[in-house]
Structure formats: C-alpha cells, structure tokens
Image (tube, grey):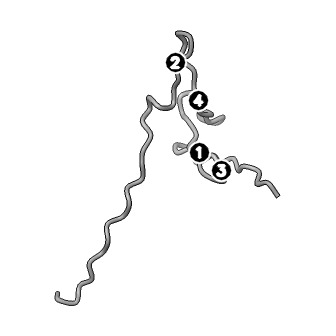
Amino acid sequence: MADEKKKEPKAKVPRKAKKDVYKLEGGKLTRSRKHCPKCGPGVFMGEHVDRTSCGKCGYTEFKKSPK
C-alpha cells in the first residue's frame, strides 16, 4: 500500500451544450453544425481536427489536409 503511485487528475474537456449548436438569426433558428447523412437532421456531427464524425452511428468524413 505504501508503494501506490498517485495518479494526476486528467484535464477536463470543455463540452458544448445543445444551445451552442443553434444560432438565432432574424427570428429564425439555424443549425451551425453539419448533420449526419445517415441518421438525418437532429443528429449533429462532432467536429475534430482531421474529421467530422457521428456519435450515434459512427459515420465519419475526413477533412482534406493542405499539402
């Protein structure tokens, strides 16, 4: 028990709320993120550095990297 190593706490990842996915423009609600083509509207794709992916079905679109 004396040999146990203390683990450092992991850094918390900032989460986005559903309210951040929509924008109000001129009295109309617009979606600011892309939706999944397989699941349909209402299921938004998560934006990563090199890809966008659906958390529900796993559909992934890779972004083109500039060369």
Dot 3: element: strand
Q: Nearer the viewer, residue 34 or 42?
A: 34
Q: CA distance from mark 3 to mark 4?
A: 16 Å
Give the label on residue 32, or none: 4
- Mark 1 vs mark 2, foreground winner is 2
Q: Residues within 10 Å of mark 3 (few under 14, many from 20)?
A: some
Identified at 53% across, 23% down, the residue is 23
Q: Secondary structure at mark 4?
A: loop
> Label for residue 47?
1
Among the two numbered marks 4 and 1 on one chain, the one whose residue lies closer to the N terminus: 4
- As drawn, the residue found furthest toward the right would be 67
Tell me the amino acid under the disc marked 3.
Arg
The residue at the point 56 percent across, 16 percent down is 25
Instruction: Name the front one of labels 3 and 4.
Output: 4
Residue contact at pointers 3 and 2, CB within 8 angstroms:
no
Rendered position, 35 above or below 54: above
Return the x and y of residue 6 as percentages of the image width and height. 26, 78
Q: Are marks 1 and 3 in contact (CB under 8 Å)?
A: no
Q: Nearer the viewer, residue 67 or 2?
A: 67
Horizontal arrangement in the rendering, residue 45 relative to residue 63 (left or right)? left
Q: Position of residue 14 (x, y in %)?
A: 42, 48
Determine contact: label 4, label 1, CB under 8 Å.
no
Mark 1 surroundings: few (<14), some (14-19) or many (≥20) residues within 10 A: few
Quadrant of the rendered image containing residue 43: top right
According to the image, label 2 marks what residue? 24
Looking at the image, which residue sits at the far left? 1
The amino acid at mark 2 is Leu
- Residue 7 is drawn in which quadrant? bottom left
**Tag 3 residue:** 51
Secondary structure at badge 2 equals: strand
Mark whose residue sits in front, 3 or 2:
2
Distance between mark 4 and mark 2 Cα atoms: 10 Å
